[in-house]
Image (cartoon, rainbow, N blue to C red):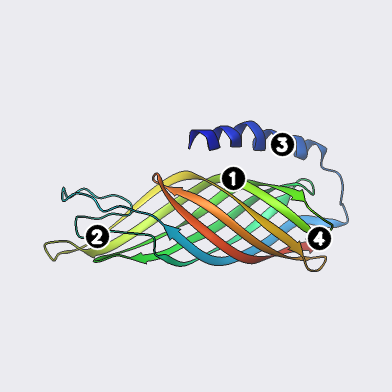
Amino acid sequence: MPAIRALFHSVLIPLACLAAATASADQAASRWSLGTQVGWAQGKGESVPPTGDLSTYSLDASATFGDKSRPGWRVFTGYRFTDYLAVHLGYTDLGEYSGDDSTQRIRGTDLGMQLKLPLSERVAMELRGGKYYWRSRTHGTSLQGEEYGFSRRGSDVFFGAGIEVALLEEITATLGWTRYDIAGEPVHLWTVGTLFRFTM
């Protein structure tokens, strides 16, 4: 995703530097937050020809990973430079998917920036993007009836958007969508969650 990488480096990173240099407001409240999100992940894969090659979502000619949804979740902590810009460090589980003869699970750590755009006193839209450091574990049965298992690691970009609704001074409800790229294959995660802001 060259365009997304270019946007991330040319817009979000400079904004973070500017915010860090000018952050001086809201001293009465802690800048740290803790969030939890649960929802559904959906990945789109393809079956491969019977060559014996292994890919992230397709194991051999008998295994096809399609559009079936599965549970996914994320927990994260954040530090906000201003009311509009924050950095988040999270752990995201994109769920386990079972194909014909194979099962795969993807999970990993994400690091990114969040930009908030207030819509009203209690409602804000948020945009985010960054890097996802993932690991996939796959096990199953080959066409010859032999069991196998392997794992892969990688790092790819993610980006997303969502809505935040302030319920109390410290608690906010969230609704979001995030697209993760896993070895070039998209996985979408739709979530609802809560964000807790610490106070001093």
Q: Residue at x 24, y 60 (%)?
A: 63
If you read the primary sequence from the N terminus, does the residue marked by circle 3 or circle 2 appear first?
Answer: 3
Residue 63 — which label? 2
From the image, tell me which residue sits under label 4.
122
Which of discs 1 and 2 lies nearer the camera? The answer is 2
Residue at the extreme left: 144
If you read the primary sequence from the N terminus, does the residue marked by circle 3 or circle 1 appear first?
Answer: 3
Q: Amino acid at mark 2?
A: Ala
Q: Amino acid at mark 3?
A: Leu
10 Å crowding of disc 4: few (<14), some (14-19), many (20+): few
For the residues labelled 3 and 2, the Cα–Cα distance comes to 44 Å
Q: How many marks?
A: 4
Q: Amino acid at mark 1?
A: Gly
Which of discs 4 and 1 lies nearer the camera? The answer is 4
10 Å crowding of disc 2: few (<14), some (14-19), many (20+): many
Q: Are marks 3 and 2 in contact (CB under 8 Å)?
A: no
Judged left or right of residue 199, residue 179 is left
If you read the primary sequence from the N terminus, does the residue marked by circle 4 or circle 1 appear first?
Answer: 4
Residue 129 — which label? 1
Quadrant in the rendering for residue 145:
bottom left
10 Å crowding of disc 1: few (<14), some (14-19), many (20+): many
Residue 15 — which label? 3
Counting from the top left corner in percent of width and height, residue 119 is at 78, 53
